[in-house]
Amino acid sequence: MKKQQPKPKPSQTPLVKPPAEFFYQAVGILQGQLVSKGSVLLFQSLNQSASESFCLKVKAVDPKLACYLLANPNIRQGCWMIYPKQKKQIALKAFLDQIPEGMEVGQLYLSGQLLPCPNPGVIRIQIQPNLPRQDKPFSIALKGYLPNAEPGQFWRLEAEKTNKGWALVDGGRVDDTIPKVAVKRPKSSKPAVAAAK
């Protein structure tokens, strides 16, 4: 008798196929410094008040960046291209001498598929690997609202880093027949709200 294959977890199950030429993305730019505590590497934010500062654990470092840092041990702070991992973890991709066009410091850029989320005021988006044998699918939670959004839809979102996580700033659904959605920046601690044009 054949053993039954384990069912994939919901966060790893595509609800629908992505649009043609859709490219998943989860990349951001943060300003901060690297701090070593024993065998643990931490990323500490810079130029922020105590109430807005944050500290993240560095889960991984790109091999090319690791070699660069080894050759330049004095580089410990500046602007870094990062990949989000778990809630308080990131992976370092590159050290930036200049900010890429179209990107801003403190912003996270996401392209993925919305997942069901029972928590009001929270958006969960899933990122799949674009090529075989890349990282496993993972999901990211953002504070904010996307009115009329449904699980399974594909969206491009922008979020900003806060000391409590990522907060929605802007977004648009990936569908030529759907107008772009404008998202208001959150005031104080209130999550962003999207309003269709």
Image (cartoon, grey):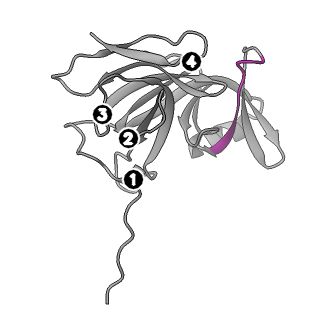
Instruction: Give the extent of the magenta segment.
Output: 50-59
* Quarter of the image with the N terminus in it: bottom left
The Cα atoms of the two marked residues, 4 and 2, are separated by 27 Å
Q: Residue at x 20, y 21 (%)?
A: 178
State whether residue 30 is above or below residue 129: above
* Quarter of the image with the C terminus in it: top left
Pointers 4 and 3 in contact (CB under 8 A)?
Answer: no
The Cα atoms of the two marked residues, 2 and 1, are separated by 9 Å
Q: Which residue is mark 3?
A: 150
Any part of residue 78 in sight: no
The Cα atoms of the two marked residues, 4 and 3, are separated by 29 Å
At label 1, counting other C-alpha atoms closer than 10 Å, the crowd grade (few under 14, some 14-19, many 20 or more) is few
Q: Which residue is mark 2?
A: 115
Q: Residue at x 44, y 36 (%)?
A: 124
Pointers 2 and 1 in contact (CB under 8 A)?
Answer: yes
Q: Which residue is mark 1?
A: 10
Q: Earlier in the sequence, mark 4 or mark 2?
A: 4
The Cα atoms of the two marked residues, 1 and 4, are separated by 32 Å
Q: Position of residue 133 (x, y in %)?
A: 40, 57
State whether residue 185 is above or below residue 27: above
Q: Earlier in the sequence, mark 3 or mark 2?
A: 2
Please state which amino acid type lies under the numbered disc 4: Val
Q: Which residue is mark 4?
A: 105
Question: Circle 3 sits in a helix, a strand or a loop, which is it?
Answer: loop
Please state which amino acid type lies under the numbered disc 3: Glu
Question: Circle 4 sits in a helix, a strand or a loop, which is it?
Answer: loop
The Cα atoms of the two marked residues, 1 and 3, are separated by 15 Å
